Image: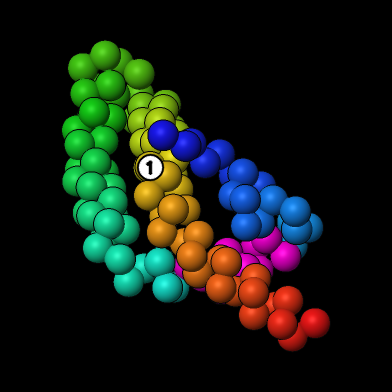
Amino acid sequence: MKVWWSLRSIPELSDLPHAQQRRLWRHCWPMVLDHWQIWLVFLTGVLGLLACKYLAEFLALGVGLGWPVALVLVSAAWGSAFSFVLNQVSIPLARPYLREARGGEQARE
């Protein structure tokens, strides 16, 4: 399984400057939102937030970390995990759109 760490690791974007990578990614992102896999990841994210609320409550009250520390720890862990999973699902779906967008750009030049 290929792991996508950043926009630079996508073959369709790897040779472009960072600003152009971001521009192409933002152009293709609305097309990726039409796929059911992305919405499943979003649903999982919402359910994960509910679980995180209870985990933060346990850490704050049960362990005695306090609310600010518990919220920061749980939010950082869940945000990082959710972002990673969203990228792993969305990048393979976006690659055909990125190829098409690059082909259209090259034709205009």
At which x and y percent is residue 97? 50, 69
From the viewer's perspective, is residue 23 above or below residue 67?
below
At which x and y percent is residue 4? 52, 41
Q: Can residue 26 be spotted in the picture? A: no
Q: Quadrant of residue 23?
A: bottom right
Instruction: Let me know if residue 22 is in the magenta part.
Output: yes
Q: Residue at x 29, y 24 (%)?
A: 60
- Identify the residue under disc 1: 85
Give the quadrant of the N terminus: top left
Q: Which residues are magenta?
A: 20-29
Instruction: Please state if 38 lies on the left or on the right of 72 as rendered.
Output: left
Q: What's under tag 1, amino acid-wise?
A: Val
Task: Determine whether the residue tagged by mark 1 lies in a helix, strand or loop.
Answer: helix
Q: Residues within 10 Å of mark 1 (few under 14, many from 20)?
A: some
Q: Residue at x 47, y 61 (%)?
A: 94
Instruction: Let me know if residue 51 is in the magenta part.
Output: no
Instruction: Please state if 23 lies on the left or on the right of 32 as rendered.
Output: right
Q: Residue at x 62, y 44 (%)?
A: 9
Residue most extreme to the top = 63
